Image: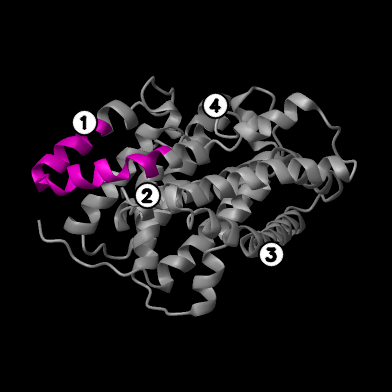
Amino acid sequence: MKVEKVQRDSNIELLRIVLMFMIILHHVVTRGLRLRELGTGGYVPTSSTGFQLLLNSFLIVAVNTYVFISGYFQIRFKVKSFFALFFQALVYSVVLYLLFVVTGLAHFDKVTFITTFFFIYKGWWFVPVFLVLYAISPILNKGLAAMSKGQLIWILLILLVFCNIKYIPGNFISERGFGICNFIFIYILAYFCRYYVPVIRVPWLWYILCSLVTFALAYTAFRMGKYGTAWNVYNYNSPFIILAAVFLFYTFRNISIRSGFINSIATLVFGTYLIHEQHDVCFMIRDFVGYLNSVIHNDVELFSSLLGVAIVVFVVGISIEKVRQLVCDPIVDAIFRIPVVQKISAVW
């Protein structure tokens, strides 16, 4: 197979920024407004529930789109990059907890402190799954490169049947799309699209239509009183959510833009994810949004406030991440100047 050189332009970096803002807003809505309690049976319907479901139907695609970007451009495994990602998460897991303790916002607990060093087992769900995807990417890349178009289609169909068709009640393989199987499926789909789907006409319209289908399914289940089903419509292995992610990617892929500022901001967004999803920060944002919801009774004003919260979280997040990079990047560089470490990393 002839390998074409694909250059990441600022359009894709802009997409990364937009996706992180979508993720933050998604968490503000689902946690702060308690929409996620649809899945636990504790949700209390409000006059804005329909709007919350509609908004979430457009936001829920962000994580899948991130994974699609990785598959489209293919992860180039480097030991240093893998370690830097792990170290980044470790720093935020430990330091943020200690910061909350020092400021009196959390009580020190030895067991809790120890668990901050084991964040891959108890912490951000996305981090360990993506680290596994990153680790096995050389195998995926070599295997996919050796496959014909027909073989790729068969693999996608098999994974679709076993991981994605039965997505609302869930299944043993895909773990509602939060596990490695769904990430692999999206990675392979993105690889296929890169080589065999060069153009999608009006992808933004298809993105809207897929999101509206998701909303229609969720809202119908909600109106029928099946709250758990309504929440499961948003499982990441939903074919409609995956398709919406593909169409959103192609929407930005069609944009021609070059900006050093956009590219520099894009390098900071993952840190924003780690910060706002850290346990103590997450609950702080949730409680603040819950307070806003209790004192603001106008839906337009409430939505404007939620946007404001998301903007503040994003700006603060990228600012903190910039400081972390200035402090931690030299440490990572120093570690990888050690001869033994260089020999290990030279394997790849």
Query: What residue is shown with label 3?
Result: 319
Q: Residues within 10 Å of mark 4 (few under 14, many from 20)?
A: few
Farthest residue toward the front? Answer: 339
Mark 4, residue position? 224
Neighbor class of circle 3 (other Cα within 10 Å; few <14, some 14-19, many 20+) is some
Of callouts 3 and 4, the N-terminal one: 4
Residue 291 visible in the current orientation: yes
What span is in magenta? 132-159
Crowd around label 2: few <14 · some 14–19 · many ≥20 (10 Å): few
Q: Amino acid at mark 3?
A: Ser
Select label 1 or label 3 by which is in front.
3
The percent coordinates of residue 24 (x first, y second) are 62, 51
Marks 4, 1: nearer the viewer:
1
Distance in Å between CA atoms under marks 1 and 3: 43 Å
Give the crowd class for mark 1: few <14, some 14-19, many >=20 residues within 10 Å.
few
Residue type at tag 2: Lys
* Vertical side of 262 occupied by 270: above or below: above
